Image (cartoon, rainbow, N blue to C red):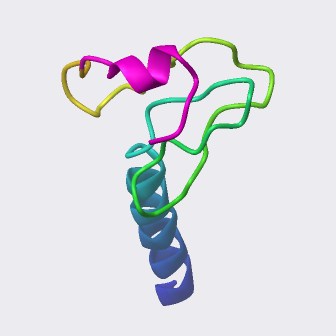
Amino acid sequence: MRAAVFTILLLVIYQGEALKCNSCFSNETDLCTPTKIQTCSGETHACGIMILTGPPQPLSPSVHDHTVV
């Protein structure tokens, strides 16, 4: 029983960390938070805002140019 509770808790924490990454591009630009968790597929062409991350943040010009700062 304790193992099941621990596993569920671990999955909830992992999912919370994954939601920190809210931008994905097909050119595989790493735009995630320092956790470096990528949650979008490689075929994603546009920025995907994840639910529960708060209001959408404005994109910087470097994101639109697909360049890494």
Front one among 30 and 54: 30
Picture mark count: 0
Q: Looking at this rendering, what residue extends furthest in the left direction? A: 55
Residue 60, image x and y in percent?
32, 22
* Most common secondary structure along the magenta stretch: loop
Left or right: where does residue 56 sit relative to residue 22?
Answer: left
Left or right: where does residue 26 sit relative to residue 35?
Answer: right
Residue 40, image x and y in percent?
65, 32
Residue at the location (37% across, 46% down)? 20
Where does the magenta region start and end? 58-69
Front one among 33 and 8: 33
Residue at the location (49% across, 30% down)? 23
Q: Is residue 48 above or below residue 69?
A: above
Residue at the location (53% across, 58% down)? 36
Residue 16, image x and y in percent?
38, 53
On the image, which quarter does residue 57 sit in? Answer: top left
Q: Is residue 44 above or below residue 67?
A: above
Q: Is residue 23 above or below residue 44?
A: below
Residue 11 lies within the magenta run: no
Q: Looking at this rendering, what residue extends furthest in the bottom direction? A: 2
